[in-house]
Image: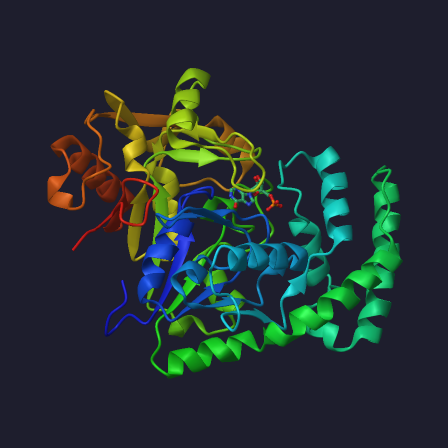
Amino acid sequence: MFGPKIQCVVVVGAQWGDEGKGKVVDVLAERADMVVRYQGGANAGHTVDTGDGEFVLHQVPSGVLQGAVCIVGNGVALDPETLFTELDALAKRGVRVDHKVFVSDRAHLTLPYHKMLDRAREQREKIGTTGRGIGPTYEDKYGRRGIRVGDLRHLERARDLVCERVTHANAMLGLLGAAERADAGEHEQLLRRLAPRLLPITVDAGRVVWEALARGESVLLEGAQGALLDVDHGTYPYVTSSNTTAGGAAVGAGIGPTAIDAVLGVVKAYTTRVGNGPLPTEAPPDVAARIRELGGEFGATTGRPRRCGWFDAVVVRYAVRVNGLTGLAVTKLDVLDSFDEIPVCVGYRLDGELFDSMPADLERIDRVEPIYETLPGWTKPLKDVRRLADLPPAARAYVDRLQDLSHAPVRYVSIGTRRDQIIEVA
Ligand code: IMP
């Protein structure tokens, strides 16, 4: 990906998340000097198999396993306890994290009261959230009452802020009919405990990224979730509370959009979704169960079974448009190894008419009928293939068809969980 003209690359999910961004970022990070997470929080679960073992990262950018400098950007909802648990676990397994992982002073903190509010709201709203406090953290941010990492530099003021926030949260918990209440004293102690560990790794992240770019270093901006979970462009209200799309990368990393040279969209060779909301190509339960079993489709953060279905070209074309994707990485092609025939959704029918884009409103998304084209399967294991030319002809035809339907060039094809199981398309 990186080259003389490509210094800053964004990697985004182009479906409903869980596309395999962690693996793609890990592979690309071999040639990156810096990796920046720009949105989301501990709701993400990026799984990386280095060959020496599997790592699941929630807050720390996946580039940490390749030794890149890792930045948690201002756009992230930072759960500090998860961050430190993760850093300790990485250090225990021999991954260098000291002087490698830094956090933006503008990132908003996710605190226990955010998680309580998330759980209480979920009882009523049934979005199927991860329960990690993401929505309430961004609500506080946009309501201009959040607590940011940099606030820990002034503990007395942070203490007053957190007491006020806890009082407000408890009133809200009462209105929502929840039994649990947040404890101001515990929150205050938490901030006191966090400050000495968090402040030494706190930086003006936008500036750090900008300086790296000015030095000519390669920078990768790592997205979490996927385009259809974007708060503006996703299947609202069944979305997460941040801009997962490439536009969010500039804002959440603290750089200008002109600094970005390429945007790689990661897509599974089929489709999954976790949580509630529309999924037009969802397969019947028996087929979904087979895909789930073959693909190990269980949430990396919550362990929930993912809903499974066929590749939806309407979704990916839409993701190409709203992200300005310059290339695609197709992952988990090997999961389809045993299927004789593979349906692919090429368009939707709505009220008897062809519909070629993603409608904004749920009422229409719920009524679209996918139009399928059936492609022949290859019924051979792909796990040892390392060159595009060595793919069985039916697998190659499948990848070519996804590319034609998606309107973006396929740059990588992943055929297994390990680092070496990826084909770079020349
Ligand atoms: P939240 O981000 O926890 O508020 O959840 C909102 C929606 O986004 C729910 O449907 C979640 O299942 C979904 N979601 C959040 N993070 C991820 C992810 O990393 N992968 C897949 N779905 C996610």
Quadrant where the C terminus is found in the figure: bottom left
Q: Is residue 379 left or right of residue 202?
A: left
Of residues 256 and 34, the one drawn nearer to the viewer in this rendering:
34
Where is residue 247? Give x, y as percent.
46, 62
Count the marks: how many? 0
The quarter of the image that holds ligand 1 is top right
Q: In this view, does 183 lie above or below 340?
A: below
Q: In this view, does 114 lie to the left or right of 333?
A: right
What colour scheme has been applied to the protein in the rendered image? rainbow
Q: Can residue 222 be seen in this view?
A: yes
Where is residue 217? Give x, y as percent.
35, 76
Occupied quadrant, residue 293: top left
Look at 23% across and 20% down and name the residue there: 340
Q: Is residue 6 above or below residue 419?
A: below
Occupied quadrant, residue 349: top left
Q: Is residue 147 left or right of residue 234?
A: right
Quadrant where the N terminus is found in the figure: bottom left
Q: Can residue 351 be seen in this view?
A: no
Look at 39% across and 78% down and name the residue there: 213
Of residues 410 and 156, the one drawn nearer to the viewer in this rendering:
156
Look at 46% across and 75% down and name the residue there: 209
Q: Most extreme residue toward the top, as rendered?
A: 286
Look at 80% across and 70% down and name the residue there: 158
Where is residue 408? Give x, y as percent.
26, 50
Where is residue 210? Give x, y as percent.
45, 79
